[in-house]
Amino acid sequence: MGGTEDPTLEQECPACHATGPRHFGRKGSFEILSCQECGTIYTSNTSGSSQAQSYDGYYTSENLSVPDFIHKRLDEIVAGFSGYRVYNRMLEIGFGAGSLLAAAARAGWNVEGVEVSESAAKHGEAQGFRTFRGELSEARFEAGSFDLVVATELLEHVPDPGSMICEIARVLRPGGLFWGTTPNSRGVSRRVLGLNWSVISPPEHLHLLSENGVRNLLVEAGFRKVSIDTEGTNPFELANFRGRKRNSDLILTGGSSPMRGCDRVNAGYRLNESLMKSGSRRTAKNLLNGLLRLSHLGDSLKIRAER
């Protein structure tokens, strides 16, 4: 008698569309799969409405702001976009606290934002930004109408990142820039922590894309010049895991992580602020990021793609 077929083996990878994934484990009630072709990690059956994540309560008065040192860094990032000004229009998808929109506005860009969170959208409107509450595809922007589209830490949240990237390509003018970040499924933290990495957190994060997976989606969408770097890691989370690794139940079941959502973002802020307090710490950070880029082991994928 033949065994019962496993339906998850027919589920396509959201990045390279390959089937036949391996089972990576379970996180809470969610089955986590790993693509054997590109290394993307994804949650089984993300199309079900019962798994939809609501972000209406994701932002509160406590996290709709960023530390002061972040503003300087955002000004530096925005300065790197100046060569792409033609229409002088910039769009940010999932703008959250609106700090990057504010930095772009300070630099003279005409900025717009898309946000699914009601509280974040209202916060953006209160700052005077032109915003749309909902999905990017629902905003129905004119084709080729933006010089620059930004999406930081967003692709991991959406059920179909390929469709979002195609829509980003559609609204960018020829030669325009897509700039984004998303967690790296093949970074050092995933390799060391496995399911216990706090970033593997369904239904908040539905998948973690690999470098090859992101590149495939960008090329499919028509981006002609693609650059992806891997940077960053959280040494505190890695070090903390060493004290917990003997807990076999946590390792095997992927028990709940103590760091979720905006708590994880705030922890990143604190780490970066600590690293910026002296020249020696900044040098150490730059050296570490250089090594992570060379080894492709950084925990974050930094995307620059020209239309």
Image (cartoon, grey):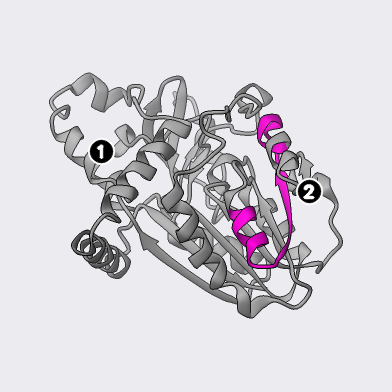
SS for dot 2: helix
Residue that carries the numbered disc 1 in the rendered image = 237
Q: Nearer the viewer, residue 165 or 104?
A: 104
Q: Which image quadrant: the C terminus?
A: bottom right
Q: In this view, does 251 lie to the left or right of 58?
A: left
Segment colored magenta: 100-121
- Please name the residue shown 44% across and 61% down the image: 211
Res. 271 image quadrant: top left
- Magenta highlight on residue 251: no
Spot occupied by residue 293 in the image (x, y as percentages of width and height) = 32, 67
Spot occupied by residue 236 in the image (x, y as percentages of width and height) = 23, 40
- Magenta highlight on residue 105: yes
Tell me if mark 2 has few (under 14), some (14-19) or many (20+) residues whose alpha carbon lies within 10 angstroms of its own.
few
- Please name the residue shown 38% across and 44% down the image: 269
Q: How far apart are marks 2 and 1 (CA)?
A: 36 Å
Res. 2 image quadrant: top left
Spot occupied by residue 36 in the image (x, y as percentages of width and height) = 41, 51
